Amino acid sequence: MCFDSRHHRDHPAQRPFQTRREMLRNTSTGFGFLALQALMADGAFAGLRQEATDGPQAAKPPHFAPKVKNVIFCYMSGGLSHIDSFDPKPRLAAEAGEPMPFQTERTMFNEDGNILPSPWDFTNYGQSGIPVSALFPHIGSVADELTVIRSMTAPFMEHAQANFYFHAGMPFNGFPSMGAWVTYGPGSENQNLPGFVVLGSGGIPLGGVNVYGNGFLPAIHQGSFIYPENAEPLNNVQPQETDLEQRKRLGLIADLDQTFVNRIGGDPQVEAAIDNYEIAYRMQTAVPELVDLSQETEVTKRLYGMDSSNASTAAYGRQCLVARRLVERGVRFVELTMVGTDGMGQAANPWDQHTKLVEGHTANALTVDQPVAGLVKDLKSRGLLDKTLVIFSGEFGRTPFVQGTNGRDHNPYGFSLWMAGGGLKKGFIYGQTDEYGYRVVENSHTVRDLHATVLTLLGLDYRNLTYRFGGRDFRLADVDGHPIRGILA
């Protein structure tokens, strides 16, 4: 079984009618949602497309029995230091201030100093004894739910390339992100919300919004932004004209729709536009209910740190709680963004501590530690953790030697991430870097291997989930990605 789309588009020599896109471009209607609302209410789309349950977001059968149904991705943009979080290296303390004993690769800024030990102590947590640094005591409390991979690698050390690669398996714009592939494969279980949601309270990673893009997949699969802290959590939904003014245009637009669709026999871009209109209409009621946390108990909100005096903690806690509510409602893929902190990294890459490692990592960890741990605990208490995959990672790690006087440079040669959820070995450490945390020495894996693992857990054959574009069958894990079998339960 293969979810393989091979689109063949006809381009008639003559075009006697104005297309939907041209009509919308040339009138003040634009993509106004009031027009959409009136159109839907009047049934003007009747006969133009299938019911929502049969649309491109409709849930599709997996290739085999899935272990999880949903993914929540907590992206630590900027490069969280693995040797200061989940991969302790005592040798760094023993050789503090000494030069590295072997040749290292050129770094991003090439300001390499001597060995810098971690400023944070590590504690072994839970029955599994997984060591976690003092940066993350709350995450340490759920250590027995974690699968820690200490042997990730990336081929790029520049942020934008690494961000695209982590999200899409390619180092540049134009390819579908992991969230887009995940919704393209199994579809979504909720037709009132996008299958791929980005919670946009924080900064966008370097590379811009295209790291969440659909690439060459139909536009319905791109990441849709929801701003849970805003009074208006959806952008661009305010009507620009009165209902009466819009209704005068709808009859003509509907006639043009019917003529155009009949003439071309179905075009993926037009179908995607219609799909987006429909889901946008339904989102007008679904999203306000989603972000209304008045029905959540104060105990639950405190679990996520929403009562914190630290504004960043409270904001990220809200993201995590809304992420839980999204997967409860069947949204397939949710990505969180890092909110503003007092760290020295920019909004796009807050973990990027080339200087002031202690100040920056402390502030960032305070932002995410309690909310992410609260998410894991809440999912488990509701019976959702075994149906959900939580991923916690940045685009690469950081060097064991100092940059300048008190920072660390980028290190793509070995870094850590952790996951929690169904189908994984819990309380488990996999892979190893050398004694300095510089390079992987055991069970080395690429981000494409992670992608193949995610698809496998979702019940999708990573080799057969393909899409034909430009004469080639593309897939998320490309030709060299393979599942990380050693972490699968």
Image (cartoon, rainbow, N blue to C red):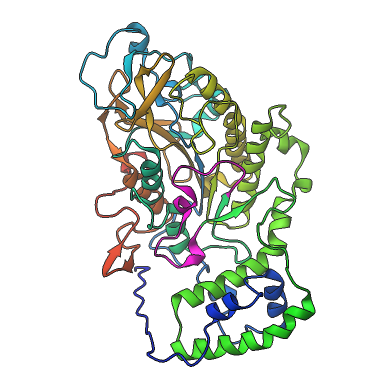
The N terminus - image quarter: bottom left
Depth check, front residue: 55 or 362: 362
| Residue 489 appears in view | no
Q: Is residue 316 magenta?
A: no
Relative horizontal placement of residue 301, taking residue 1 as reference (left or right): right
Task: Reply above or below: 94 against 368.
Answer: above
Residue 4: image x %, image y %?
A: 35, 69
Relative horizontal placement of residue 297, taking residue 118 as reference (left or right): right
Task: Reply above or below: 187 against 419.
Answer: below
Q: Is the magenta stretch mostly helix, strand or loop?
A: loop
Residue 59: image x %, image y %?
A: 51, 66
Relative horizontal placement of residue 253, taking residue 113 as reference (left or right): right
Task: Report the magenta residues as a range.
Answer: 199-222
Residue 435: image x %, image y %?
A: 29, 18
Outermost residue, left direction? 103
Depth check, front residue: 58 or 271: 271
Depth check, front residue: 267 or 292: 267
> Residue at image x 48%, y 35%?
349
Q: Does the magenta stretch include residue 206?
A: yes
Residue 445: image x %, image y %?
A: 29, 39
| Residue 254 appears in view | yes
Task: Reply above or below: 398 against 163.
Answer: above
> Residue at image x 67%, y 48%?
228
> Residue at image x 45%, y 60%?
214
Relative horizontal placement of residue 33, taking residue 209 as reference (left or right): right
Quarter of the image for residue 416 reads top left
Task: Reply above or below: 287 against 204.
Answer: below
The C terminus - image quarter: top left
Quarter of the image for residue 117 reads top left
